[in-house]
Image (cartoon, rainbow, N blue to C red):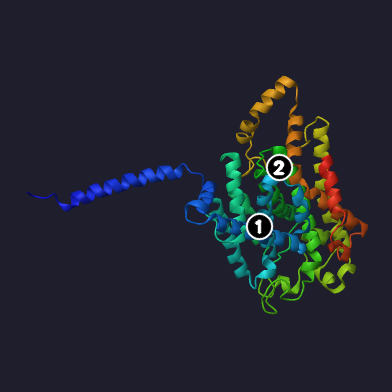
Amino acid sequence: MASKPPFACLRCASRRVQQAHRSSTKVRQTRRPFSQFARLSSDSGVSAARAKAEFESAHKFCADLVRQTRKYDRPSYTLSTFIPRQTATFYLALRALNVSLSLLPDTTSTATIGLMRLQFWRDTITRTLAGTPPKEPIAILLGHALSDLDSRSKGRARISKGWFLRMINSREQYLTNTPYTNLSALESYSENTYSTLLYLTLSALPLTSITADHLASHIGKAAGITTVLRGIPLIAFPPPPNHHSDQPPGLSGAGGGGAAQSGAIMLPLDVMAETGLKEEDVFRHGADAPGLRDAVFAVATRASDHLITARQMLANLRGGQDVGHDFEHEGEEGHEYHNAYDEQNASSRIGAGSSGTSDSAMQLEEVERAFGVLMPAVSTSLWLDRLQAVDFDIFKQELRAADWRLPWKAYWAHRRKTF
């Protein structure tokens, strides 16, 4: 009896393989990427004890990084007390990522290595958001937080990858301590870093609110501008090599012995021109450089203006009014509210129509829910008050010391829901 040609069997086998592949692909497509990380801890042979040990080790690493890195993010650990418990892990991972990015100019010997580290973080964020974080402490902690968020929100929470990449790209732009061309450039940097940190934390509550994001934008800009001011003495007169890294002497600058080694003045160039401040004068005379205090005052005033605007917005809402002006970033990536926001609040609006509750009351409710995330307004305001008390002498040593008033000032601000 003649046998069938072998290619017929091969065609049948190929058809069966294709059908099995389509079936498995359909199953995989129904799974949420964040949930995949949770399965990896149980279904791939990794013991629960090992997964727990990894999480605890990552949590300790991130907590120590945020708590001990006083140069960059001193208030964040204190203010973590006011972050809702279910979002605390995400907050800690996010702040640790911010510190790691901030440290790059001090911990890389050349700009090329710095760029490679930034690309590493881009790849790490991409993998973590896809549900397969690498074995890196911040990625492990962030992966756990995203898995928990996915479970709590049943897959409806939106975490924008674009916001993460925006933070990294902004750090890259000023990796070698390039001066800000003008005050608007400094505001843009603050928006893309510190405001974006607040946007991401709000998303992890989860909360989609144009009013909360609007407040976060102003508060983040104030915090970012203040952080740049606080770092001026450290960047102008950097510590000796090896202070934050194991690089050999002479290689601590982000540009191969460039900016971080020789020092740089990170004040906007247009403000320096208006006040007559020269970079060489700061290097020669320090705090006594002509025009320095005027330049610091001008920049600090812009930060203060953002805080005043945030306070006025909150006062308007409590008075039953609109916030007073439009959100300039509405419609940008991550700030699309017309679909998600309307679905989230549809039932609330129907109830508001029957009970007489105004839109401003609902917006105020959203802001009060987000208030723990907006607490950097308190630490920023306290530091600006201290700067004014020393007549805008940015080199005063007490400006770099911890503010003992922050814990109880923050407690009362959070309790009263006021900045």
Q: Return the residue at label 2.
A: 213
**Amino acid type of the residue that numbered disc 2 sits on in the rendered structure:** Asp
Label 2 sits on a secondary structure element that is: helix
Q: Is residue 218 visible?
A: no
Q: Position of residue 370 (x, y in %)?
A: 73, 41
Residue drawn at x 66%, y 61% as measured from the top left = 61
Which numbered tag is attached to residue 306? none
Q: Return the residue at label 1.
A: 59
Residue sitting nearer the eye, 31 or 121: 31
Q: Position of residue 298 (x, y in %)?
A: 85, 55
**Amino acid type of the residue that numbered disc 1 sits on in the rendered structure:** His
Quarter of the rendering containing residue 333? top right
Residue sitting nearer the eye, 139 or 100: 139
Label 1 sits on a secondary structure element that is: helix
Residue 339, above or below 88 = above
Q: Position of residue 379 (x, y in %)?
A: 82, 52
Dot 2 alpha-carbon crowd within 10 angstroms: few under 14, some 14 to 19, many 20 or more:
many
Residue drawn at x 79%, y 67% as measured from the top left = 234
